Image: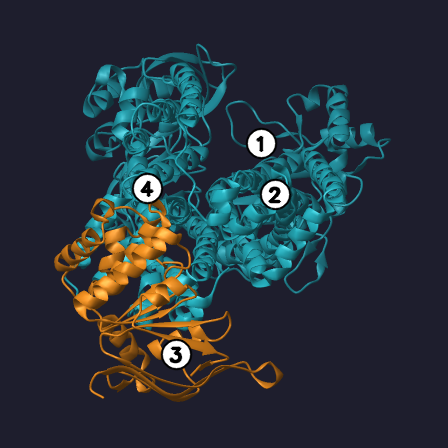
Chain colours: A orange, B cyan
Amino acid sequence: MADVVVAGVDVWKVYGSGDTQVAALQGVNLEVRRGEMVAVMGSSGCGKTTFLNCFSGLDEIDKGTVTLEGVDIHAMSDNAKSDYRARRTGFVFQSYNLLPVLTAVENVEMPLLISGSKPKLARSTASAMLTDLGLGERLTHLPSQLSGGQQQRVSLARALVARPAIVWADEPTGNLDEEGSRQVTALLRELNQKHGQTILIVTHDPEVARGCDRTLRMRDGRFAD
Amino acid sequence: MDAVSFLLLIVLAVVLFSAVLVWRHRMVFRISVRNLRRGRTRTLLVILGLLIGTAIISGSLVIGDTIDQVSVHFAYESFGYVDEALYNQSAVGTGYSPFSYAVYPALVNATSSNSQIAGITPEVVASVGMYDRSTQIPQTNLNLVGANANQSGALGSFVADNGSHLAGPSAGGVYLDDLSASDVAGRVGDSVVVSGASRLTLTVQAIVKDSDRGGFLGGESVFVSLATAQTIQNDSGRLNFLAVTNAGSVTGGLALTNSVSTYLNATLPTLGPIAHGVTVHPLLQESVNAAAAGGSSFETLLLVLGLFSIVAGVMLIVGIFVTLAEERKGEMGMLRAIGLKRRELVYSYYFEGLFYAAGSAFAGALLGVGIGYGLIYAFSTILSSNAQQQAAILDSFTISPTSLSIAFAIGFLLTLATIVGASFRAGRLNIVRAIRSVPEPPPSIRVYSYLAYLGAVFVLLGALLLVGTYRGNSDISLPTIGGILVIAGGMFIATRFVRNRIAFTAGSLSLLVWVGFEPLRRVVLGTQHTGTIFVIFVEGISLVLAAVMLYIFNASTVVAGVSRLLRSRPGAVSIARIGLSYPSRRPFRTAINLTIFALVLFTIVSVASFGSSVEANLNQTIEAESGGYTLFGFSDQPIANLPGAIAANHSLSGFYSNVVPLDSAGVGVAWSGLSGTWSDSIYAAPANVSGPTDFYTSNEFNFSSTLHGASTGAVWQQLRTDPTAAVVDGDYGSSSGGFGPSHPLLSTGTVLTLTNGSGITRNVTVIGILAETFVTGIWVDPSTGNSLGANQPDVFFLRVAPGQDPVRASQLTKSAFFAEGLVLLSFADILRTSIQATVAIINLLQVFVGLGLAVGIAAIGLVAFRAVVERRSEIGMLRAIGFRQRGIFAVFLLEYSYVALLGILIGTALAILLIYNATIASTSGSTGGLSLAFAPPWLDIGIVLLSAYVLMAAAVLTPSLKAARLAPAEALRYSE
């Protein structure tokens, strides 16, 4: 059990009430071990993104428990959850969600600054990370000056720069072409192997899933056996 | 066609044009209506933001109308049923010259067939003193009005304080109006001594109201029978005033003034020599016209100050529409992609804008009425000396349909014109970039070429204006605008060849130096230019825009500096990084908000500092105007040796350290270049005085200019002995007004021809122009004065000894010399009173210009609300990577605080600079006669700044909290 980083027991998430009530998660159970790279697949509306939000602590659950590194994430206060996310998790989203007014390096150093790193150290760490990802020439570019693939690499760098224990990725290749998609998947895998981080990827892309250690299929708010 | 009809015609044309467009583009119209309905809260906020400009216009016009009405009201109160007056006023005298009583029956007889004349009343009108024996209080300089009850029916009746109507006093009696009764604490039954050419003891028969008949000549009057007045003036059998009443009501009779005046002018010569010198004066008409002009001036002042808020309002409209365009960029791109034409996109904004413009103009015009009433109420409370006046001001509150129509039309057209401009900008989007939300690329080189051509036109126009007006006494705003155009033109041309940052930084710095560095402009433009209130608008707008431009093109440097300050606080760096990046990397929105805040604060702080500078200069003004004396006096009868008489009076002697007599006389003044003759007084020290009682050696008056730059002492020394020399008051040297009436201008070296009532003439050369304007006239040497009839002392300067009470000294001295009709005026009291009124008005103006703050608050609030929607997914991302709720709140608060504080800083600094410049200009008399001392009211400014910041913080509190409380998953899910 010591190796289990993400654990969920009978997790329920219900939206709406009365006739419009929809159970997006219906008693989900899950265990993910440290260093695992897991893909979650399923059709649109099956609850993949809800799973990611609820298990990462971004959204509340209605029933069950979710423990991250042995700690019940939903028993934490909002501030404690924020601090946990800042220190121990990273996120990658389909639409990159970079701050448009910050340059590439400023976006990447943001998690470090939130965790209280010294600005100089944060800057050098972020620059090194972007250089590793082949963006050394684009450090001071604004997101609007980067291609989609470059933006997603910046987004990846931001998710990984603070060396989080868990990385949550929601359709990270959804906006990319085949080549971009392959690059991002390879990068995730490389970082996973290099730093031993646990990575959970919600995706539609079988290529991405093929690159993972394990693929879970979701249907109607449950993982299929 | 008048202005209102023209404006309404334009509105009608716009409405018809819009109706045709709506009919032809019904689908686009439906989109606009849906846009309005889908964001009702936003629609309401937009209208609230837009209506301020109209409200300011409407409020200014309503206040102008009301002040017109108040002034006219008091004009009617003062003259009642006296429409025209017939009197003889010689060129060199100030009073009414008596003429034969026979003129009255002759005139009545000659005009009996004219149905427009309701009546003619024979009167004696003079200035007298009064001493109440019961209360033992004297008062001088009161109006004496003598008329018989049985001959003055056309003038209406007196109204006693108890409400009864009275025809007039009987022989041996006197009516006091409320003001004169208050002066001497008089009551019915008191025995009073009225002192004119002779003294008469009378009994107070009634205290009457200061309205209609009792308000004649503006109050402080005593009313007696005609025979009593003739006795007091030693003019038995003579009159000096015939009051003519037109047919109709008090107000209705005014319409007949021109006709009646023409008729009387034609009739007077037929009366023969008895009416020689008697002329017709349309008193009520002149007074009403002057009142209306006064109201109009105030309206202009309010409108010019309101212009800042109106410009801020225009910026807000631009900001709102740019925000709307950004918000709908994606859907606009989609509409274009499925075939909507570019102009139809513009129409969709135009239709939406029509609702905003009409709604805000309507609501703004009505809100302006409320604002107007609030300010009028404040005026009535502060400026009225009694409840009656206050009630009269409030009763005069006027809402004219004309003013409301003008406010609505201007507000509607101004809003719509700005919306049309903003709509064209929004319509110029690129479809792909709009759909993919890709930022617009920088302008092409062609755009900079066009800008350079525009710049060349600016430079040419500016140079022409500058060259044509840079010297002389034209309005200083003309050469200032010329310089601004040259600099702006140069800046536009430079953008074609160098980086924008360099061109705009150099241009804005040049503008700041040209408009803000007063010594430079004084060197280039000289000191002879005149100025109107419009100068403040030109300078204010230029300075604020230049400062905002300077910031916008150097924002990254400033932000880097501010961020460095926050580095020492762990955790603050990430908040500062995001909070400060939005204002520095979204320059257009930031410029709009910054300009709005800076303009509003500039106006408020300018007005506050102006009032404070006027107040602070009081002591300096008293010193300059008083020549070191405490009291200025004049008497009806000459007082042969006032210094000696006071020295011999044990109860008075201790009060004074110096008493200086002057002989005076009325003269006609002419000089080469002056059309006609100017009436004024001459003053000369009596020949037999010396030492401290000699005016020439003991006064401390200074000169604004002297012939050949002679020293003050040398000028007074020359005047003492040179019969060809003269010194004139300060109003002769400057057109900027002052305490005296407006004078024709002259310079040192001008040769004046002085002619007295007997036709004796003397030529004198002006060797000095005094700085003071309180005592108006011409000072000459004793022999010249004597030859022109100034040979008896009736004007006095008195210096109260240190530690003595000037009020008590004045009261006792007036009592002692009551028989001679001695009037004493305190320099300090009069100057303080005049300045208090100015300061009270300035304080109210602060409230008026403070309304502009609503524009700033609306702007920030709207942008903040919009930002929460626009940045939802960014907020979600920040929360995902570990930002706490309070971190998000801090980001928003920091961002808007930074913009607001920067705007506040720019506006305040520039306002203080403007006032500093004004204090420099005031030394050359370029501030409308007001002397200023640089003394910004730091406490008041601090309160204003704090209030502005707190209001801003309140406006962004709700959106900031909303942003902070967004659930991360919900925020990430959101897409517009």
Residue at the image position 22 percent from the left and 64 percent from the top: A191
* Amino acid type indicated by mark 4: Ile
In 3D space, how far apart are the residues under numbered discs 2 and 1 (Cα atoms)? Answer: 75 Å
Q: Which mark is residue A54?
A: 3
Residue B678 percent across, percent down from the top left:
48, 20
In 3D space, how far apart are the residues under numbered discs 1 and 3 (Cα atoms)? Answer: 98 Å
In 3D space, how far apart are the residues under numbered discs 2 and 4 (Cα atoms)? Answer: 30 Å
Rendered image quadrant of residue B648: top left
Give the vertical position of B389 relative to A159 (above or below).
above
* Labels 2, 4: front one: 2
For disc 1, the marked residue is B96
Give the mark nearer the N terminus: 4 vs 1. Answer: 1
Res B61 seen here: no
Q: Classify mark 1: residues with Cα within 10 Å, few (<14), some (14-19) or many (20+).
A: some
* Labels 2, 1: front one: 2
Compare residues B117 and B284 and report the one nearer the observer: B284
Disc 3 is placed on an element classified as helix
Residues marked 2 and 4 touching at CB (< 8 Å):
no
Q: Which mark is residue B347?
A: none
Residue B524 percent across, percent down from the top left:
29, 20
Disc 2 is placed on an element classified as helix
Task: Answer yes or no: are tags 2 and 3 on the same subunit.
Answer: no
Disc 4 is placed on an element classified as helix
Give the mark nearer the N terminus: 2 vs 1. Answer: 1
For disc 4, the marked residue is B552
